Image: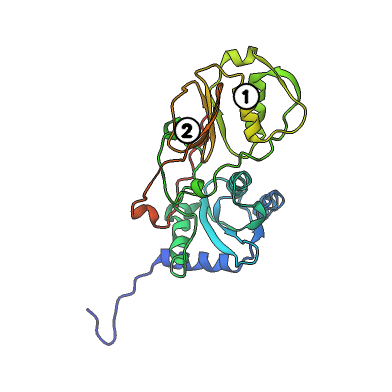
Amino acid sequence: MTDGYSDQFRLSITEALSKQLYAALKRLEPAPLTQENLDALAPQAEKLGLPNMSGVYQLFRQLPGEERQLTYVGKADEPLPDRLGNHLYKLSGREGISIDEMSFKCLFVEEDLSSVSPEKMLIKEHLKTGKIVWNNRGFGNNDPGRNRDRTVIKSNHFDLEFPIDLSRRVEGLTPGVQSLHQVLGDIKSGIPFNFRFKHSAAFKELLVTVPDGEMTVDEAFRFVAQYLPEKWQICALLGWAIMYDDSPSTYPSARHYYRLDGVSTQKPKTRKPSKSETEDAVEDEDAEFAE
């Protein structure tokens, strides 16, 4: 209850931080999402006395002839260059998108602000004026490991709209005679998405001849498949690729199967997202790649 000369004042620290973070990012100009720009972040953080380099960031996409669009708001508990580098890596290997379309802004945030979730504050501010395209669409998730390979993804999932690009060239393949184990390792390190496979001592003994010339991911998988035992298969899922001795098992989100007897395709299965899953939110990006 109030009267004419007294009232109550409640200080909202989170509201003040939210508005300040939003304003601080708004003052920045987006920079192209390139390795050169990410490498420049560490010296900037050092000058500011922020050795852990954690913070918040925004990703933007601009299609030719269209306005720049905010696509993602995220946080980085580890160094910002590492988190943004993960996004650069991921976006470099997707169909339907060019890394030249992508740009970013970021703020280094003091470590003691992590408990108040600054990225959630930013999302709340942005949603007052528009939508954030990729939040809560699976964009920020890393490969969660074997237990999630059979997950039925949401119909609005990032991987469904922008699946891994199997027409991309594999970097670093060496022509000549070598073990299948070596070839698998070279493929894994030469593509911009995760290729997780089960190791086998037999593959270290099996010698194959890698032909001269470049190979796309699809061609490399076809090459490997002709040397696989009958029970083995490579599965190109929407967001990553796997190889295990579980043929002819199928996976809901697979597009292609590479087996000894040839290549087959399927339409990925999806599910309708719940109401809470269609709301913009911060995803758990801290899952590590499982080997």
Q: What's the mark number on residue 145? A: 2
Residue 61 at x, y = what percent? 59, 59
Label 2 crowding class (10 Å Cα cut-off): few <14, some 14-19, many 20+?
few
Q: Which mark, by number, is residue 224?
A: 1
Percent of width and height locating residue 218:
62, 34
Question: Where is 3 relative to 117, above or below?
Answer: below
Position in image of residue 50 (x %, y %): 60, 52
Indicate the amino acid at tag 2.
Gly
Tell me the mark number nearer the camera, choosing from 2 and 1: 1
Q: Indicate the amino acid at tag 1.
A: Val
Q: Nearer the viewer, residue 196 or 38?
A: 196
Disc on the earlier residue, 2 or 1: 2
Query: Which image quadrant is residue 223 in?
Result: top right
Q: Which residue is at the far left?
A: 1
**With 200 as the anchor, is 148 left or right in this view?**
left
Report the disc number at residue 48.
none
Give the answer, above or below, for where 111 lies relative to 165.
below
Q: Tell me what residue is drawn at x 60 percent, y 65 percent.
A: 68
At x 69%, y 53%, the residue is 37
The quadrant of the picture occupied by the N terminus is bottom left
Q: CA distance from mark 2 to mark 1?
A: 22 Å
On the rendered structure, is 209 left or right of 17? right
Circle 1 residues within 10 Å: few <14, some 14–19, many ≥20: many
At x 67% / y 34%, what residue is drawn? 190
Q: Quadrant of residue 4?
A: bottom left
